[in-house]
Image (spheres, grey):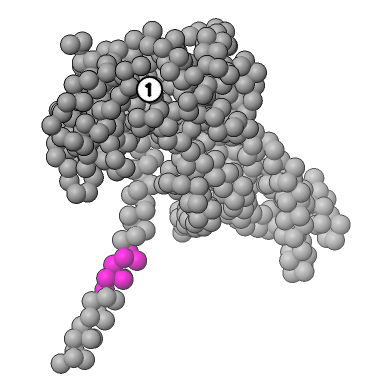
Amino acid sequence: MAEPLVRVVGLTLNLRPIPQPFDFQAGAGELWMLLGAVASGRGELIRVIAGLDQPQAGRIELFGADLERLSRRASVQLRSRIGVVLEQTGLVPAWSVFENLALLIKYHGLAPDPAVEDHVVKFVEVCKAPIAILSKLACDLSPLESRWVGLLRALIIRPRLLLVSAYLPQETLTAGYDVWTFFEDIVVPMNMTILVDAGPQALPMGPDTRLLVMDQGTLRAAGLASELAGHPDPEVRRYARFSDA
Amino acid sequence: MKSIRQVWTWARRSVEALGRVVVIPIDRLLEELDFLAAVLMSLSLTPRGQWPFLFRHAWQQIYFTAVQRAYVFTVVGLIIGALTAFPLIVFGIRDPQLLGRIMHIMMYHQFNPILAALFVAGLSGAAITAELGELRANQAIDHLAAMGVNPYGFFVLPRLMGVMVSLLILIFWLDAGVTVGAAIMLSFYQNIPADRFFRVCAAGLTVDAMALTVGMAVMQAIHIVLIQTLRAFRVRAYVDIPRALPSAFAQSFIGCLLISLLFSLVRYG
């Protein structure tokens, strides 16, 4: 198994009724899909790992560092390597798409100031998004465009960990270029760990897809879809249905 | 027996209500100080690359609050100056020294800072609450915080710096407008030469008095921004924004009045 990038130990989510504690770890370059019913704790787990909510108990380690023991400055540095996409688009509406995309690069000093524009334009080109979108104001974007710009903003910093807690649209901003091809072409080569809470319909599921099935705020099962397809729990088996195609 | 119990319940509830009246303002003050501490601590966490952001956004706040409102403040200052002069004319006050003192005590150190704070809380403060409230509702602040951007340093600190500078500029601008407005009316009705009136007004501006007024304005600016951003940070959904706006305005303005009262007690008490 690859070196764990995300490790949660004895984690109890802040839900009612108080759920059972659970452990989980994800290695570098692994893509995990979070599955479960509504209010099963998927979104809560993403928010806790993103540092937006506090758990009731337990330990979270990111990149080998215990979050509770980190200084504030170290925590900021650590979070500069995390990309996050939540339910809402999270763009600054009064800013242009370029300003939204350039913000984190400038803030974390990921490129020298004169090179930021080039950096953003090249990234948008690589992602096969139309360059004209950069000059649009975020408040003028369509829901599909907003969703994609939100994802691009999370990816442009080349994060080592990507947390997605939102429905990813099947289509991209380029006709005939679907979301799965985008992930194969752009995201997978970045070798980042990805936790997606987007429902089974967001990304195609195959036998090698890693699944994290949650129920009532705790982990019910975790593993490859092919392994979970033979799980004794019928609820887990239900989520682990995949197509061999 | 039943009536004794009712009286006892009534008395207990009254004491509880009285306690709440005392505790709630203290609780809010502590909450505000806690928020201020978080904002000031964010200064130490600000990476070097973010300083240009900080100054750019602070300048934008100054431009929005002070520069764009300069025209409004000139007109308001002139009108208030004229209105201030009328009672003095009616009372037949002709002594320039006394007129200068009245201008200082009433206008420069009390009424003008309160009026400027009222404008800033109503215009810029409301804009801050609405803007940050929207960023809370659409999870922009959550996104950026999760990706390593300190929300206090990035969203609150530049506004705090900008509003502090803006309030000082606006008070100065208002003082100038009020002096000119009053001078025009006094020279017209009382035949007091405008240059003599200006000299009397300027002569009374001591360093101590100005330092106290500057301190008061800085505290008012801090209070306005903290209350408005604190309310904005509590927003959970878009529907909370219109609810947050009037209460943030009322709370920040009442706080400004209390700060003025406190400084007046120090100055004259």
Is A141 situated above or below B111?
Answer: above
**Residue B118 is covered by the magenta coloring:** no
Nearest to the observer: residue B117 or residue B226:
B226
Residue at x-position 43% and y-position 21%: A154
Q: In which quarter of the image is residue A225?
A: top left
Q: In which quarter of the image is residue A186?
A: top left
Residue at x-position 62% and y-position 28%: A137
Q: Is residue B185 visible?
A: yes
Is A242 situated above or below A187?
Answer: below
User: Secondary structure under badge 1?
Assistant: loop
Q: Name the residue under label 1.
A: A204
Residue at x-position 32% and y-position 36%: A43
Asked whether, in this view, residue B206 is left or right of residue A181, the answer is: right
Is B13 situated above or below B30?
Answer: below
Residue B190 placed where, x, y %? Answer: 83, 60
**Residue B17 is covered by the magenta coloring:** yes
Quadrant assignment for the N terminus of chain B: bottom left
Badge 1 crowding class, 10 Å Cα cut-off, few under 14, some 14 to 19, many 20 or more, is few
Q: Can residue A11 be seen in this view?
A: no
Residue B202 placed where, x, y %? Answer: 68, 44
Asked whether, in this view, residue B7 is left or right of residue B90, the answer is: left
* Magenta portion: prevailing SS class: helix
Residue B121 placed where, x, y %? Answer: 56, 49
Residue at x-position 48% and y-position 32%: A89
Asked whether, in this view, residue B112 is left or right of residue A47, the answer is: right
Letter of the chain that mark 1 sits on in the rendering: A
The stretch of residues the image draws in magenta is B15-22
